[in-house]
Image (tube, coloured by chain):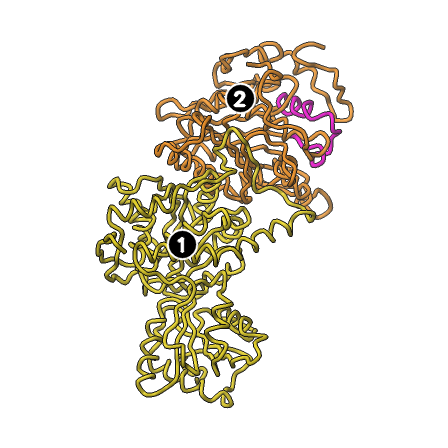
């Protein structure tokens, strides 16, 4: 499962992403985690992903993909699901379309701001499908404006630090919002990192499994070198820092019966003394929870203190 | 017509729209309710409950969501229809432009209603006119029967390989949507025949075509953008031929249907009144009465607003002395509202161009009376007395214009 090279790769050549962009690294493992990756039909809201992967007449997509407008990813997913169901019931599915999965891809602006109603409406309807929010903490496609998921205190072009201006004052927790809808079958926060390199894949696999029965939501923090201002080769190190400082909490929520049950996947060392929520879930991933086991608490002492000092050689899967 | 394919059924415009959706074997209907087109979604949902409608009905959280669902469902190769009107169309305006660019033959059933502010739920064409240049085919029905007939034509024409464009079936809110009349609807044999005729919607780049994946709707930069839009124009130019074929089949096999324009007493007329939608009945009646008084006047109804039947208009109106055009939507700050502007530009460059006078009437459900039409006919005979050549004359406004 974890051998990515053997898998069908949904994105081919011809990407136009910025150097060091993590969106493709986010989308690829998610599509590949589907039971039949070729049968994933994807819809993308306007944003970096559209521009990066599909500039006519070139497309990097090797699966069926369509772009809709900015704010209606949820409605788009419902339409695809409805069409699949209708054609299935009428016996008119094209050959090879026996296990089609609907995937919605949207950035944080398209998910948390302009398309929040669409997301929550889709969750309320309970349509099967997986919604992937690649969250680069701002409107990076238009040049780092503040979005609903930009953390409190963010410096963006519309919430600049400086004389008589203040940084962003609000934060937003998307997963809490999503979980107000009882139909949601799975929700998880993940990111790209060197320490938990398979976290996204595992969660995508679990999400696709849950998505058979209803809406599943994957919130992936995808660092943006241009917007966040770090060197282009450091994206996964940024993810490491986010995880280890608790800025990016790794957790997932599953639905058991009518209840949503939260699991914290990793508790950073420095927060352990504040933790009174019981045992940390150790075996969330049925396959290879080694990512945590190998590098769980060991790495906390190795957090780089500031960005320019980051050395790529520090820790990969527990090896130095 | 060798075989009887119809039964008589009383129903209003909304019911006929829902009936046509069901009879055309539509795969997906995505709805959000809005007066006066709400009943279409209610009736389709009820037909689904009763097992008559075998497609999927999806109730979404707003028109923009509903039309997005139509958009992607159509991308997946499903025959798709979406009813809405007024604020709903404005709310979904992004999609209504996108679906013609993406070449999706979605049928939009619009029970035309005025737009805010002030709030008004009654008939008017102000909701559809903002989309007249969106690249969609637009038909205007005059009664519930035409709503039913045009829905089949809409699917047939829109899904044709030469067209692949969204088609609007417009009908006046309440005046058609809620007015129950006696209609012909297809019986079981007729439904089978019409479904055979429509075939199944075969989209070559369907998203469910797993073996040959496609990307659609992506970013197109200046090097290709105008080519993509030009293709819409070319498809639009194919509509008259395809529509003629479709209307011919429908008329020969089921019952007669008008497709581009409907003329009344135009042959020897010196003056003509042009309109769209349900008010044609009033205009026709006024023309009939005026004819009895010896007036040489005729009436013309535009059915296919997009593509605009320029050739027919030049033939039918080119030899008239003066033409009055009755718009049900306004223009503020220019000479002519949409319909009149199109009529005038269609007649331009003829050796002798008829004088054209623009009227705005019946907005927000106000009733156009036969007496008002008489006044219009009278005014056509005296173009030298026209005070307003630079803007439309509004009919029936208190302390407003005089005809």
Picture layout, residue A40 above or below residue B227: above
Mark 2, other Cα within 10 Å: few <14 / some 14–19 / many ≥20? many
The residue carrying mark 1 is B246
The residue carrying mark 2 is A33
Taking the image as shown, residue B105 lies to the left or right of residue A107, namely left
Picture layout, residue B185 above or below residue B297: above
Does the segment drawn in magenta span residue A303? no
Mark 2 — on which chain does it sit? A
Taking the image as shown, residue B197 lies to the left or right of residue A194, namely left
Does the segment drawn in magenta span residue A235? yes
For this orientation, the residue located farthest to the front is B2
Q: Nearer the viewer, residue A244 or B26?
A: B26
Examine the rendering and report whether any part of residue B177 can be seen.
no
Taking the image as shown, residue A301 lies to the left or right of residue B68, namely right
Instruction: Provide the residue span drawn in magenta.
Output: A223-244
Picture layout, residue A143 above or below residue B279: above
């Amino acid at each position: 499962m974890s051998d990515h090279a053997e898998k069908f790769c949904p994105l081919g050549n011809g990407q136009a992403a910025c150097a060091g962009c993590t969106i493709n690294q986010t989308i690829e493992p998610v599509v590949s985690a589907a039971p039949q990756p070729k049968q994933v039909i994807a819809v993308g809201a306007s944003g970096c992903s559209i521009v990066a992967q599909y500039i006519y007449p070139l497309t990097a997509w090797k699966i069926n993909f369509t772009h809709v407008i900015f704010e209606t990813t949820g409605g788009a997913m419902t339409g695809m699901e409805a069409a699949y169901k209708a054609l299935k019931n009428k016996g008119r599915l094209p050959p090879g379309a026996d296990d089609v999965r609907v995937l919605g891809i949207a950035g944080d602006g398209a998910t948390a701001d302009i398309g929040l109603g669409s997301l929550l409406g889709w969750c309320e309807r309970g349509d099967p499908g997986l919604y992937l929010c690649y969250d680069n903490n701002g409107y990076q496609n238009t040049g780092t404006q503040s979005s609903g998921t930009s953390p409190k205190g963010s410096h963006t072009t519309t919430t600049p630090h400086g004389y008589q201006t203040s940084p962003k004052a609000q934060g937003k927790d998307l997963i809490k919002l999503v979980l107000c809808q009882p139909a949601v079958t799975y929700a998880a926060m993940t990111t790209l990192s060197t320490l938990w390199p398979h976290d996204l894949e595992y969660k995508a696999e679990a999400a696709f499994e849950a998505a058979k029965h209803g809406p599943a939501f994957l919130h992936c923090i995808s660092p943006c070198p241009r917007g966040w201002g770090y060197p282009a080769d450091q994206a996964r190190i940024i993810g490491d820092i986010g995880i280890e400082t608790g800025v990016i909490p790794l957790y997932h929520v599953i639905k058991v019966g009518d209840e949503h049950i939260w699991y914290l996947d990793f508790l950073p060392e420095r927060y352990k003394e504040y933790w009174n929520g019981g045992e940390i879930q150790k075996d969330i991933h049925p396959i290879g929870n080694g990512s945590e086991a190998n590098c769980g608490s060991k790495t906390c002492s190795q957090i780089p203190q500031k960005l320019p000092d980051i050395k790529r050689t520090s820790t990969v899967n527990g090896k130095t | 017509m060798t075989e009887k394919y119809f039964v008589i059924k009383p129903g209003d415009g909304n019911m006929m729209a829902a009936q046509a959706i069901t009879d055309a074997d539509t795969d997906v209907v995505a709805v959000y309710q809005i007066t006066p087109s709400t009943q279409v979604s209610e009736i389709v949902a009820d037909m689904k409950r009763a097992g008559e409608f075998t497609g999927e009905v999806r109730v979404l959280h707003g028109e923009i969501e509903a039309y997005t669902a139509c958009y992607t469902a159509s991308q997946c190769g499903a025959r798709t229809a979406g009813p809405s009107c007024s604020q709903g169309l404005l709310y979904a305006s992004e999609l209504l432009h996108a679906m013609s660019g993406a070449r999706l033959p979605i049928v939009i059933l619009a029970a035309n209603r005025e737009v805010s502010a002030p709030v008004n739920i009654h008939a008017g064409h102000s909701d559809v006119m903002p989309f007249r240049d969106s690249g969609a085919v637009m038909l205007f029905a005059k009664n519930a029967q035409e709503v039913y007939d045009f829905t089949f034509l809409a699917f047939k024409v829109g899904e044709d390989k030469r067209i692949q464009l969204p088609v609007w079936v417009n009908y006046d809110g309440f005046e058609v949507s809620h007015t129950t009349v006696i209609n012909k609807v297809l019986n079981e044999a007729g439904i089978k025949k019409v479904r055979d005729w429509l075939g199944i919607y075969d989209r070559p780049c369907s998203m469910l075509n797993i073996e040959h994946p496609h990307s659609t709707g992506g970013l197109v930069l200046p090097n290709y953008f105008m080519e993509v839009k030009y293709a819409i124009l070319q498809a639009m130019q194919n509509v008259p031929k395809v529509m003629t074929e479709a209307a011919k089949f429908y008329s020969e096999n089921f019952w007669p249907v008008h497709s581009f324009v409907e003329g009344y007493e135009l042959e020897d007329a010196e003056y003509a009144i042009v309109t769209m939608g349900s008010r044609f009945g009033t205009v026709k009646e006024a023309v009939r009465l005026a004819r009895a008084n010896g007036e040489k006047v005729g009436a013309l109804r535009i059915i296919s607003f997009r593509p605009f039947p320029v050739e027919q208009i030049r033939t039918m109106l080119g030899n008239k002395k003066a033409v009055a055009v009755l718009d049900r939507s306004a223009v503020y700050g220019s000479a002519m509202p949409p319909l009149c502007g199109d009529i005038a530009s269609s007649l331009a460059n003829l050796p002798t161009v008829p004088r054209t006078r623009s009227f705005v009437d019946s907005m927000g459900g106000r009733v156009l009376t036969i007496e008002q039409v008489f006044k219009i006919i009278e005014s056509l005979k005296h173009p030298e007395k026209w005070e307003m050549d630079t803007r439309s004359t509004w009919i029936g406004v208190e302390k407003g214009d005089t005809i």
